[in-house]
Image (spheres, helix red, strand yellow):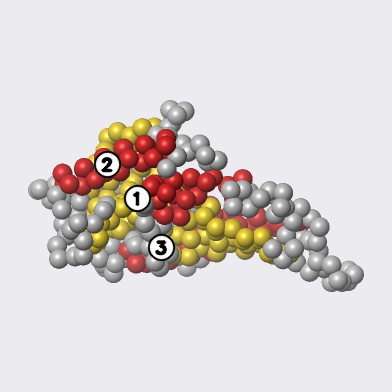
């Protein structure tokens, strides 16, 4: 695979995606995706109520690792995105092709935090990057462990065993703080038991490229499952009805494309909301004592149930 071929594939995807959004051709848009980007694309289509957001793209860059003898090949890319309001963000993508004659499919897409620059990927004399294997031990966190450790920090916070490996931030210790607060308010206001679990997505790939400092840029997916369970009456109170029986619990705005705000307002047993989250992280080399930093994130509610 050449740099020119990757550039053509990126241009074709971004240009085709815009045309499909404008035409409302949902089925065709899905045919351009796989892995974690598939459910995210579905969510993006349906949550926009038939009016998908449109973007313009520039400053497109491809990051192509040398690959040979593999049935599947991939490359990463970055591009600057401008929305209708004029807000500018940097998108990070990966594309995968199965076989020489296969179609390039978008496997991953995320957004760098505002003002954040992508990790500086190391390139050889010909402009090619170096991909890391899943168990590469030359970096502080091997690619296969980045997702599980990130999930641990999000659940356990600054006191967890993995907290020193990944820097505090809105999608690491920030999630932990959010969960602690929601548990308290769910119990006090709605008589609900709230839980939120993060897990690495085993069926979705993790992509890693060597950076100039000897570390890596890692692109990976987490699945977050949040649940609200109706709790029993407190001890000493008349039994027979659950404490939460008849209490309305509002549907989060981002989940209303899946759960009807009127039909699913009450939780008789349990409500569950699933998010697919895509991350960009900068991981230092093994010799470094610095933590990894999450530098990009995009997530959508992709599943839900209420009973």
Q: Secondary structure at mark 1?
A: loop
Q: Earlier in the sequence, mark 1 or mark 2?
A: 2
Per the model, the C-alpha gap separating discs 1 and 2 is 11 Å
Pick the residue in front: 25 or 162. 25
Decide: is 90 above or below 278.
above
In this orientation, which residue lies closer to the viewer: 18 or 169? 18
Q: Residue 289, located in which quarter of the rendered image?
A: bottom left
Q: Nearer the viewer, mark 3 or mark 1?
A: 1
Question: Residue at the spot x=30%, y=33% of the render?
Answer: 58
Measuring from the top left, give residue 19's x and y in whole percent: 36, 36
Residue shown at 41% from the left, 63% from the top: 147
The picture places residue 210, in percent across and down from the top left corner, at 23, 55
Residue 209: % across, % down: 25, 55
Mark 3 falls on what kind of element? helix
Q: Which residue is mark 3?
A: 147
Question: Which residue is disc 1 drawn over?
Answer: 32
The tag earlier along the polypeptide, 3 or 2, is 2
Q: Find disc 2 in the rendering and name its residue.
A: 12
Quadrant including the C terminus = bottom right
Q: In the rendered structure, are the residues bearing label 3 and label 2 in contact, judged by CB atoms less than 8 Å apart?
A: no
> Residue drawn at (78%, 61%), measured in percent from left and top?
244
C-alpha distance separating marks 3 and 1: 25 Å
């Amino acid at each position: 695979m050449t740099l020119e071929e990757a550039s053509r594939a990126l241009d074709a995807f971004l240009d085709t995606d815009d045309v499909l959004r404008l035409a409302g051709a949902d089925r065709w848009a899905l045919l351009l995706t796989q892995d974690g980007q598939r459910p995210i694309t579905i969510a993006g289509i349906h949550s926009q109520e038939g009016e998908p957001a449109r973007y313009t793209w520039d400053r497109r860059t491809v990051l192509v690792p040398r690959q040979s003898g593999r049935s599947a090949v991939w490359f990463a890319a970055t591009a600057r995105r401008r929305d209708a309001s004029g807000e500018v963000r940097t998108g990070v993508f990966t594309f995968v092709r199965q076989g020489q004659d296969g179609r390039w499919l978008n496997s991953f897409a995320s957004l760098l935090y505002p003002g954040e620059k992508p990790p500086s990927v190391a390139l050889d004399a010909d402009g090619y990057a170096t991909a890391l294997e899943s168990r590469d031990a030359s970096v502080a966190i091997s690619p296969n462990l980045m997702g599980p450790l990130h999930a641990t920090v999000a659940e356990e916070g600054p006191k967890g065993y993995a907290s020193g490996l990944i820097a505090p931030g809105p999608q690491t210790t920030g999630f932990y703080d959010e969960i602690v607060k929601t548990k308290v308010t769910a119990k006090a206001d709605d008589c609900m038991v709230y839980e939120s679990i993060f897990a690495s997505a085993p069926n979705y790939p993790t992509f890693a490229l060597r950076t100039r400092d000897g570390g890596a840029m890692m692109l990976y997916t987490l699945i977050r499952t949040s649940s609200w369970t109706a709790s029993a009456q407190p001890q000493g109170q008349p039994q027979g009805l659950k404490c939460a029986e008849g209490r309305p619990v509002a549907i989060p705005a981002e989940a209303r494309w899946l759960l009807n705000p009127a039909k699913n307002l009450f939780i008789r047993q349990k409500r569950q909301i699933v998010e697919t989250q895509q991350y960009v992280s900068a991981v230092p080399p093994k010799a470094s004592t610095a933590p990894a930093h999450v530098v990009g994130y995009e997530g959508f509610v992709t599943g839900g149930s209420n009973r």
